[in-house]
């Protein structure tokens, strides 16, 4: 009898332990579930914060690139006017019988060579994102790549514009001697009047430059460099800019 009572007592003890074990495991499962839920909520909140930050960056970048597009289009227009003016000068050189007046020559020279070409895009936010490492907040990989490439393209554009500036200066240098006169150009272009500068009575004509081979060579180099600046640099840059704007519009939540 004692043996059977002992066996029954052991069974009861084992049953209590099993119940306790089940209870303990249940507690652990509940704790784990609670932790997972908390982590999920925290992760969701964090993702919302990151998404909000990304949207702020996207809108800011869109504003910057829209402004840069206007600047680039204006620069393309100026560059076109410059090399078309240079082509008109080349036409006068090729056809001596159609020689312009001093006024026409000076006005054409002034409008063609008075404006330097320099693209100055709005990149402050983009540079801040790159320098701070926040470019990684842009989730679209293609957009990140194009934004990074945009920065490298700016270096290429600057080099081309510097070369165009060199060719422009070579033309202007031909007027910085005793044989020719910048003053004549400025007088006929209205610069003297606008700035109320004192005028000299004697005027040096610049029309002899139309018979100068050096002048013709410099004009040709200017035309070629201006044309290359547009077709090989500005036009591809505009396409790249439009691609970035298109991707930004797709990523910005309405």
Image (cartoon, helix red, strand yellow):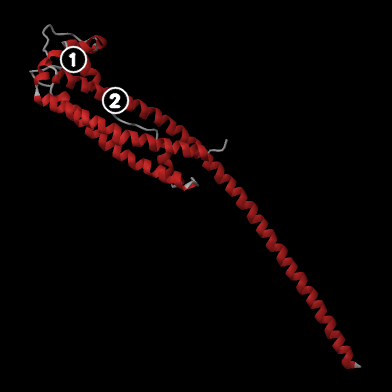
Give whichever of 78, 191 is nearer the camera. 78
Q: Residue at x 32, y 31 (%)?
A: 119
Q: Estimate how packed mark 1 is, as few (under 14), some (14 to 19) or many (20 or more) residues with alpha carbons within 10 Å.
A: many
Residue 79, placed above or below residue 154: above
Q: Which mark is residue 80?
A: 2
The residue beneath circle 1 is 105
Residue 122 is drawn in which quadrant?
top left
Residue 173, placed above or below residue 133: above
Q: Label 1 to label 2, Cα distance in Å?
A: 19 Å
Q: Position of residue 5 (x, y in %)?
A: 89, 89
Give whichever of 249, 49 is nearer the camera. 249
Q: Residue at x 85, y 88 (%)?
A: 7
Using residue 248 as the reference point, say whether residue 238 is left or right of it. Answer: left
Q: Which mark is residue 68?
A: none
Using residue 59 as the reference point, say whether residue 239 is left or right of it. Answer: left
Quarter that holds the C terminus: top right
Give whichever of 146, 28 is nearer the camera. 146
Give whichever of 249, 198 is nearer the camera. 249
Residue 149 is drawn in which quadrant?
top left
Q: Looking at this view, name the residue that lies furthest to the left.
A: 179
Element assignment for label 1: helix
Residue 214 is drawn in which quadrant?
top left
Q: Position of residue 137 (x, y in %)?
A: 49, 46
Q: Position of residue 53 (x, y in %)?
A: 53, 42
Q: Looking at this view, name the residue that lies furthest to the right.
A: 1
Q: Residue at x 25, y 30 (%)?
A: 227
Q: Residue at x 66, y 55 (%)?
A: 38
Q: Position of residue 83 (x, y in %)?
A: 24, 25
Do tag 1 and tag 2 residues touch (Cβ < 8 Å)? no
Element assignment for label 2: helix
Q: Estimate how packed mark 2 is, as few (under 14), some (14 to 19) or many (20 or more) residues with alpha carbons within 10 Å.
A: some
């Amino acid at each position: 009898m004692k043996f059977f009572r002992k066996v029954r007592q052991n069974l009861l003890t084992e049953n209590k332990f099993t119940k306790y074990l089940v209870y303990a495991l249940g507690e652990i499962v509940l704790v784990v579930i609670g932790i997972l839920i908390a982590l999920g909520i925290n992760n969701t909140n964090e993702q919302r914060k990151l998404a909000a930050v990304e949207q702020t960056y996207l809108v800011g970048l869109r504003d910057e690139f829209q402004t840069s597009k206007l600047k680039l289009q204006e620069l393309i227009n100026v560059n076109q006017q410059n090399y078309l003016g240079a082509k008109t000068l080349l036409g006068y050189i090729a056809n001596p019988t159609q020689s312009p007046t001093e006024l026409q020559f000076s006005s054409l020279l002034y409008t063609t060579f008075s404006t330097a070409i320099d693209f100055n895009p709005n990149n402050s936010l983009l540079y801040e994102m790159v320098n701070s490492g926040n470019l990684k907040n842009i989730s679209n990989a293609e957009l990140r790549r194009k934004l990074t490439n945009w920065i490298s393209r700016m270096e290429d554009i600057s080099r081309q514009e510097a070369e165009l500036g060199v060719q422009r200066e070579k033309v202007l240098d031909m007027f910085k001697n005793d044989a020719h006169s910048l003053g004549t150009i400025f007088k006929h272009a209205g610069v003297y009047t606008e700035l109320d500068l004192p005028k000299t009575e004697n005027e040096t004509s610049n029309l002899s430059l139309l018979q100068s081979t050096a002048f013709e060579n410099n004009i040709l180099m200017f035309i070629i460099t201006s044309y290359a600046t547009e077709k090989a640099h500005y036009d591809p840059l505009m396409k790249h800019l439009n691609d970035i704007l298109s991707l930004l519009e797709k990523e910005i939540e309405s």
